[in-house]
Amino acid sequence: MLAKLLSIQVIVAETERSTTLFASVILHCDYSTSANLQDVLVTWRFKSFCKDPVLEYYSTGYQASLQLGQDPSNDCPDRQRTVRTVIQKRGSNEPILGADYRERKITIQNKADLVISEVMWWDNGVYFCNIDAADWLTVLLIIIGALMLIMLLCICCCQCCPQKCCCYVRCPCCPQTCCCPEKAVMQHRMMRDAQKAMAPWMNGQPIYAPISSNPSQTGVPILYSGSFSDYPSKQNFAMAPMQQMALQHQHAQPPLHHMNAGAARPIGH
């Protein structure tokens, strides 16, 4: 596989700027890259000072940080300061202002120079020039990798539950514990089918229905409808009396005859 290497160099000529209120200011930022310029995303972000370099300059904590070689105005995590996106621009498209700067006269000129037409008092802070050049191949590989990770997690979750396993793909993260082989799945299915087949016996329900639902025509049920647990105590039930009763019932009604080529054959209900 051939890998494409992208390089970006960002140059900021001035690290500190001062201006008066309502004046215009330009923060210069330049870059050079081997990527396509249409794929370059320029983002200016604002971060408030950790400690105000004007109001807190003579404080004990500020001076102690300076003596330790630290920058008390900028050396703090982002959660302790206000962070806002000022403006973004991709390639030669029109720049898009951030949510907090929609009504401001701010734009990007040249490659990445930030132009603020009217400086307000709350603009005092640190501005960062970020240059991103995302290549389409890199984005595609990231998307494919994310999809493969999701599929891997789904396979592992599926195979962690053999009762509902839907695949036989070996899980590379834990092949001994998560994978459910075909033998185990088939054994579970056979046990489940056997439990369904034995359910009428275990619940004491009749397995065979009577021949007819009308008691006047059938007399007594011919087939045994007890439960499996009652079967040993009912092994000696008499079939002969039931047959005699059935024969008596047949003689009580006039038989129907069906003429065949050989002889007449009685047909009972």
Image (cartoon, helix red, strand yellow):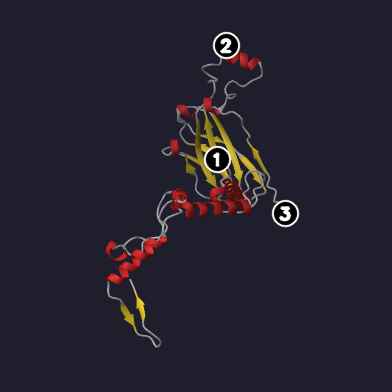
| Horizontal relation, residue 253 to residue 48: left or right | left
Q: Earlier in the sequence, mark 2 or mark 3?
A: 3
Q: Earlier in the sequence, mark 3 or mark 1?
A: 3
Give the spatial CA distance, label 2 vs label 3. Answer: 57 Å
Q: Which of 265 and 25 is in front in this view?
A: 265
Res. 71 image quadrant: top right
Residue 36 rendering spot, x and y as whole percentages: 63, 51
In the rendered structure, find residue 43 and report the number of the disc placed on it.
1
Q: Mark 3 points at which residue?
A: 2
Q: Nearer the viewer, residue 214 or 3?
A: 214
Q: Quick check: 118 above or below 92? A: above
Q: Quick check: 110 above or below 207? A: above
Mark 2 surroundings: few (<14), some (14-19) or many (≥20) residues within 10 A: few
Q: Assign the N terminus to one quadrant of the image.
A: bottom right
The amino acid marked with disc number 3 is: Leu
Q: Are marks 2 and 3 in contact (CB under 8 Å)?
A: no
Q: Nearer the viewer, residue 240 or 162?
A: 240
Q: Is mark 2 on a helix, strand or loop?
A: helix
Q: Name the residue under label 2.
A: 60
Res. 53 image quadrant: top right
Residue 219 rendering spot, x and y as whole percentages: 31, 62
| Horizontal relation, residue 27 to residue 211: left or right | right
Q: Quick check: 249 above or below 116? A: below
Residue 211 appears in view: no
The amino acid marked with disc number 1 is: Thr
Residue pictured at 61% horizontal, 30% vertical: 15
Mark 3 surroundings: few (<14), some (14-19) or many (≥20) residues within 10 A: few
Q: Residue furthest right?
A: 2
